[in-house]
Image (tube, rainbow, N blue to C red):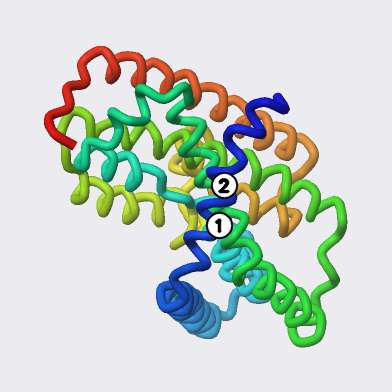
Amino acid sequence: MRRKLRIYLPFALNEMKRQMSYKGAFYLFILISTFSSFVSYFLWMAIYGSTDRVMLGGLTKEEMVVYIFMVYVTGSIVSISISDWVSDDVVKGTVAMNLIKPLDYRLSLISRALGCSVYNFFVPSVFIWIGLEIYKVNVLGMPVTGVWNVVLYIISCIMSFLIFVLFDFCVGMIAFFTNYIFGLLMVKEALLKFLTGALIPLSFFPEGVRRVFDFLPFSSMVYTPVMLYLGKYSMAELEFVLARQAIWVVLLYLLGSLIWKRVTTRLVVLGG
């Protein structure tokens, strides 16, 4: 374990340094991502303002405010697209160099994603999180989020991160068969916004649709951690959602291993 940490930790550290080296991209990222969150905020406030109902989709108006901004915080930590890196390696042919090195290619990608996730947490997610807590107490009149909820949220986020990157690794493997997946990645991003609950909370969907979502990995990526943070699960539901996340981590790891084994047996690199 210590040996692997010594080998793969530099991948995470180098990714953090790379992120910090592009200040223009950094400020643009903050501007665009926070702008989209505020667009969602004003949209949902208009929806709640147009109805007499106190609760929609199991969420009050105040809880929806927390949901919107915690979706941003969670998404920036969890949703690290490694399929872009895989596609780039395939197009440039640099994947051949990764294969001849005594490294686990998937683990190196996950390590890079971890560095990106840690960077996103400190810049700027943690400040938005703190600001949200201050706002919910002083303006919304809600209590401070309990320590137990925060601990469950962090545990769930760790598994959500693994689910997302392992799933994204499987998506990236398609590049070995098609060579170029830019269009597919755009479709993937749009679908994940919908399926993960980042766009619309999954509790707004009909019961039958929600049952389908319960057995898919997508709800475990963003929706589950945020609902844990809001304390929306009973003890029985809590055990189910955490067990579901753990199962999907294992299943996606095994699926990625099978796909990678098949890919490496047919890989042909020209140039690079």
Residue depicted at 74% across the width and 73% down the height: 130
Q: Where is residue 161 in the image (x, y as percent from the top left)?
A: 57, 44
Residue depicted at 22% across the width and 46% down the height: 184
Look at the numbered disc 2 and give the secondary structure of its residue.
Answer: helix
In-front residue for pair 79/215: 79
> What's the CA distance linking mark 2 and mark 1?
6 Å
Q: Residue 16 carries which label?
A: 1
In-front residue for pair 114/95: 95
Give the left or right position of residue 263, taking residue 193 as reference: left
Q: Where is residue 97 in the image (x, y as percent from the top left)?
A: 32, 30
Give the left or right position of residue 262, taking residue 207 as reference: left
In-front residue for pair 215/116: 116
Q: Residue 91 carries which label?
A: none
Residue wearing tag 2: 12
Q: In this view, does 122 lie above or below 165?
A: below
Q: In which quarter of the image is residue 28?
A: bottom left
In-front residue for pair 188/258: 258
Q: In this view, does 91 lie above or below 2?
A: below
Residue depicted at 71% across the width and 79% down the height: 131
Residue depicted at 49% across the width and 76% down the height: 30
Q: What's the amino acid at mark 2? A: Ala
